[in-house]
Amino acid sequence: MAIGSISIIAPISALAVVVPVAVGLARGERPASLVMFGIVVAIVGSVLAGYAPGEATTNGVGMAMLAALGFGSGFVFIDIAAEDGAIWAFTTARGASTIAIVAVAVAVAMLGDPGPRS
């Protein structure tokens, strides 16, 4: 939100659902025609919601696409991991993210505050 127009960034990020749908289709799953229609409507709606009249900036679009890919991939991997039990899948995911956050915090603490950027 700080680097781009939220009216463009949010709908792109919301397209994270495209990743699990694409993976499902690649695995041979065939949803009902009403479900496919809903998917198309959701994608078109997201594109239309991102339309901003007047001067629009594309700052942050790449980061929004990366966020959508990350969230969508997370949904796919949680689904795969949850086959052995949802509790273990989420516990492992939260444990891994906690370790990553602590590692980043320790690295920042050791390197010091870089100060304001110019």
Image (spheres, rainbow, N blue to C red):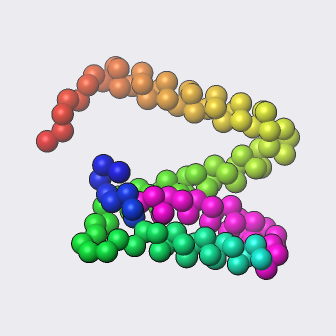
Image side of residue 104 versus residue 85, left or right: left
Q: Of helix, strand and loop, which mostly describes the magenta segment?
A: helix
Q: Tell me which residue sits at (80%, 38%) in the image.
A: 86
Locate residue 3 relative to residue 86 in the image: left or right: left
Residue at the limit of the structure toward the right, as seen here: 84
Quick check: 105 above or below 9?
Answer: above
Instruction: Residue 7 in the image: state x and y as whole percent.
Output: 39, 62
Q: Name the quadrant of the C terminus.
A: top left
Q: In this view, does 38 lie above or below 16?
A: below
* Residue nearest the viewer, comparing 8 with 89: 8
Image quarter of residue 97: top right
Q: Residue furthest left?
A: 118
Residue at the image position 26 percent from the left and 25 percent from the top: 113
Image quarter of residue 109: top left
Give the x, y percent position of residue 8.
39, 64
Residue 113 versus residue 56: which sits nearer the camera?
56
Q: Which residue is drawn at 77% across and 49% down?
A: 80
Percent across and percent down for residue 85 are: 84, 38
Question: Could you say which quadrant of the image residue 63 lies in?
Answer: bottom left
Provide the residue span drawn in magenta.
9-33
Horizontally, residue 53 falls left or right of residue 27, namely left
Q: Work out whether 116 lies above or below 110.
A: below
**Residue 114 location (% of width, % of height):** 23, 29
Residue 79 lies in magenta, yes or no? no
